[in-house]
Amino acid sequence: MTQTSAELLQQKEKEHISIIESYQPPATTTADNDGNATREDDSNAPVSEGPTLEQVEAALYGLWILYQTNNYGPGFDYLIEKFKPILATKYKTKSDQILLKLMSQVVRIPRKIASPSSSSEAAAAYETEPQLALLDKMIKEATQNGRTQLRQKLQIQLMDFCVVQKPQADLDDMIKNLLKEMKKLDDQLLSTEIFLLQSRLYFGVGNMSESRTSMTNARTAANQTGVPQILQADLDLQLGILHCESQDFANASSCFMESLEALAREEDRRRKVFNQHEAADNESQRQNNDEGHHSELEKAMVDFERMETEFLLAKIVQKQLESVVYLLLCKIMSHEPDQVNKVLEKNPRALPFKDHKIVQALIKISEAQKKREFKTFNETLAHFQLEIGEYRLLDKQVRLLYNDMIEKNLLQVLKPYSSVEIQHVANLVGLPISPVESYLSKMILDKTLSAILDHDKGQLQILDVGKADQSYSTVLETIENINGVVDSLYNKASKLA
């Protein structure tokens, strides 16, 4: 960055800060000594020459764009700190709207770490810490100012951020308190959102039963009110994930398909509106430039709205990708690897994601599954480890499939043998001897394989599992029947006595 551009950025920052700091919130209604309501901002009083709330809003957005473009993380904290006086304004709805817009954008910006930790997990936790602290600070500020609706929506933002970044069980109390408030207000729409977040939270921490209960409550609340299309898509997506976790891949596929279609329709609608606004803004900007009325504040408002819409569209596209990934997973887990390419080729909603890394990983996994190439399967898991790790359900299900495929193949390979060298078995399945020994040991302990593993000789002795001797079980059954007869006779004798 040259000195000239740095000075220009500094000048713009000072201009925006000057507007924000010079804003004087209109006084709220107060009471005089006789208890009558009075207003400090009397309509007869001279109009203040300070900036309006709309100008302050534009300056806040301009400052956000400046910090975001130049990746200046600490500036976001300063930006929100400067917003606090605006909470005192009488325009509660407007100020709430501005703050929620800013917070939704600020928390999504990953903080740049000067000296990242050697552990990627520790680094990720460090990056999310400032956002969590900032959200917590603004929730406390809203509570102190008596802004109940603002506090509730900020808490929902906090829960959504935590569920996506790092599910935390300690959010459960906050969710339950919010649900109690929603029940008093009879707000079914917000209740649906909160129940859905609760379901995702429980799923993230591994509590499946509670996750299903919350999902049922979310659907019940949604049925009692009209929900936006994007919220319905989120409900279908989470329901599909829970079906998939229960190995109900047929119903899961239907849910993921519904979610994908709804998200695609929502994306089409928003892009159409976005393109119309973009054309109108470009025309308005051209006219202002021609007439010399171009304003930096107006440009900041337009740029912020554009970035906000682009972020929402990117979020919708990401959810579509998630639906496609889980839809393909269902085909793989249903042992229908041929269907993976058919879904991508015949579904116009899924086709745009065909070249995405995670989708390519699933294509390779389906091909390895079809050909029973365990080496290729394992290499694919290793090569796409980061991409697969982003989807908790995918990572778990694919590894379960891998283990199941190996066990079935081992049973098939061992059929002709009564005794076989373990190295030969490893060669036949195309895996190193160490994991093959582990799988064989596990299968013997699980009683899916009746054999003896001789580590000294490096051999596997297959036991004859012909017709089992029924004598032992027959004797046990006879003894149980005799016990029943004796007990019955004892009861009758007791009644006669």
Image: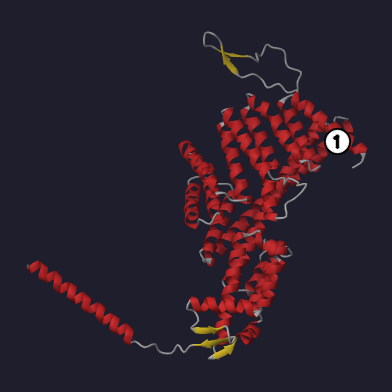
Which residue corresponds to the image point at 69% horizontal and 70% vertical from the top-left?
A: 380
Residue 387 location (% of width, % of height): 69, 61
Q: Pick the residue in front: 454 or 340.
A: 454
Residue carrying label 1: 9
Which residue corresponds to the image point at 14% horizontal and 71% vertical from the top-left?
A: 490
Residue 270 location (% of width, % of height): 69, 48
Residue 88 location (% of width, % of height): 64, 24
Task: Quadrant for residue 111, please give it.
Answer: top right
Most extreme residue toward the front is 456
Instruction: Note whether 112 is above or below 438 in the view shown.
Output: above
> How is the structure coloured here?
secondary structure
Q: Pick the residue in front: 492 or 364.
A: 492
SS state under label 1: helix
Quadrant where the N terminus lies? top right
Check disc 1 and give the amino acid type: Leu
Instruction: Note whether 109 is above or below 249 in the view shown.
Output: above
Q: Is residue 87 left or right of residue 1?
A: left
Can I make out residue 64 in this image? yes
Which residue corresponds to the image point at 63% horizontal and 39% vertical from the top-left?
A: 135
Q: Is residue 213 left or right of residue 455?
A: left
